[in-house]
Amino acid sequence: MSRRSYSRHIPDFRLITFYAENTKSAVHAMSPLTKSALLVMVILLVVVLTDTYLLIALFLAVLLFYVAGRLPLHLLIGWYTLPVLFVVTLAIMFVFTESGTPLLSFELFGDTVNVTDNGLLLVLKLLLRALAVVTFSLAVFMTTRYSHIAHLATRTLPRPLAGIFLLSYRFNFETSDEMSDVMDAMYSRNGGLVKEMTRQTSMFAAIFGLAFVHAFERAERISKAMEARGFSGEFPMMEHLPRPSLEGYALMLIVAALFALATYSRYVENLMVW
Amino acid sequence: MAHVHLEDGAFSLEWVIIWGLIAAALIALALYKLGGSRLPTRRMAIAAMCVAVGFVIFQVEIPIFGGLHINLTPLMGILVGPGLGTLVVLVINIFSAAIGHGGWGMIGPNAIVNVTEVLLGYYIYRLCRMRLNAGRFASGFSAASVALAISALLVVVIVSISGLQDSTQTTEETFANMLLLAAANIVTGVIEGFVTGYIVSFVGKIRPDLLEDAESPRSPGDEEQAEGEGATRV
């Protein structure tokens, strides 16, 4: 977490960019095209795989990829908070209502509530799937330079969307700095000690409202400056996108083959017999 | 949270594709309404700034109920209109997926939920201001609360129709299981409604022109289309 981050459980964009631009590792050296293709395949694999052991193996492989990028493991645990929260809030009731062998029983409002093995397994699998993709996604963004992300965005998104994406990527830093300054000012004046809900809400709303007004004013100034400099809607790319190496192609081929195998096993004939 | 984002692996491949296609159709419609690939620089910059602010605000924890993160998607709709708001929430979803707040494969269903919030936020606000002559705070509060309550139910409907992977439960059973989540989201949606009401009042006091589109008697989206066709805003 960088000095200006204000949440322990949401990845700090400035820190992500710092790792992408300044750290060197085998993963950093990998072509962005290889990493993007692998990200797509990891997403497809978590959707297709249903076997718990294979999902654990996939998660561990992804974690290894993250470690190979020389990225901070201790921060990753904090960053898992939100994905875990999302999965648990989505699936918590299934722990009690999914059919299966009861592992734990307790009385609630006169009814017997059971925690079943299949319910727990369902949550475990959803967590493994979510965290595998989160870890790989963070690894990709923390090892890919902005210029390469810009290339990928212009190639994959429609022109207006690519424009919005690239501009907002740059604006993120300035906006987060401004928000940090306002938050610092508020906390230094004991604003954090206000406990009353209405006052908290109105205080934060004023901060957010100010951020929006500043954003609009800045956007108007920037658009005039861009047009004055002859902006045509295209963002010129100053660097070439490195093509995948032979090893990169081999890695993509292996993961694609695993995906094909997993798809066949899921939809045609089950091969996962342990 | 004001609403739950779905993570990768929750749905089977066929449902990921179906929701993705529906979301793609909504985005294509928004792009068409905005004039295709000819998005004026001013609107592009405003959208990008909204993405940046929305993304940063989401990272701020409001110390209510032990910590609350809000997305302000209905407010985006009120401020930038339904067309541009749709693109804004899509890009926020892309950024969010990059940091694990919602899955990449779930950008489709998450975008459907967020676009619904944008559309409802904008149209309910217009309805309250233009037809019911309500004040800015009341209009903003109603627009955001209703939009978030409906989107919370939409999440339940999407999950119930798709079914969670590895779950043996029927659509009805899944629906019943998800109602608790919807109730929690509706409560936090009311808090976001208050925040939206305050922000709209605040913006209305110092820059009322930013609410011009949502408060003007012109038919909704006219301005977007006019700007998309290259007309100059007066």
Image (tube, coloured by chain):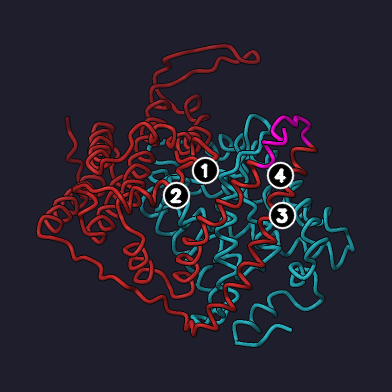
Image coords of residue A97 (percent x, y): 50, 27
In the rendered image, which residue does mark 2 sit on? A14
Judging by colour alone, the chain drawn in red in this rendered image is A
Q: Are marks 1 and 2 in contact (CB under 8 Å)?
A: yes
| Amino acid found under the numbered disc labelled 4 | Phe
Examine the structure image and report whether residue B45 is included in the region drawn in magenta: no
Mark 3 or 1: in front is: 1
Circle number at residue B79: none
Is A5 placed above or below A144 here?
Answer: above
Q: Are marks 4 and 3 in contact (CB under 8 Å)?
A: no
Is B39 placed above or below A165 here?
Answer: below
Q: Residues within 10 Å of mark 1 (few under 14, many from 20)?
A: some
Report how far apart the C-alphas of labels 2 and 4 lie in the structure: 23 Å
| Amino acid found under the numbered disc labelled 1 | Arg
In the rendered image, which residue does mark 3 sit on? A209
Q: Residue furthest right?
A: B133
Instruction: Answer yes or no: are tags 1 and 2 on the same subunit.
Output: yes
Chain identifier of the residue bearing label 3 in the image: A
Q: Is residue A237 left or right of residue A25?
A: right
Disc 2 is placed on an element classified as helix
Is B171 placed above or below B106 here?
Answer: above
Is A195 placed above or below B60 here?
Answer: above
Q: Is residue B41 left or right of residue A116?
A: right
In the rendered image, which residue does mark 1 sit on? A4
Q: Residues within 10 Å of mark 4 (few under 14, many from 20)?
A: many
Give the magenta-colored segment's residue range. A185-197
Q: Earlier in the sequence, mark 1 or mark 4?
A: 1
Chain identifier of the residue bearing label 4 in the image: A
For residue B205, which quarter of the picture? bottom right
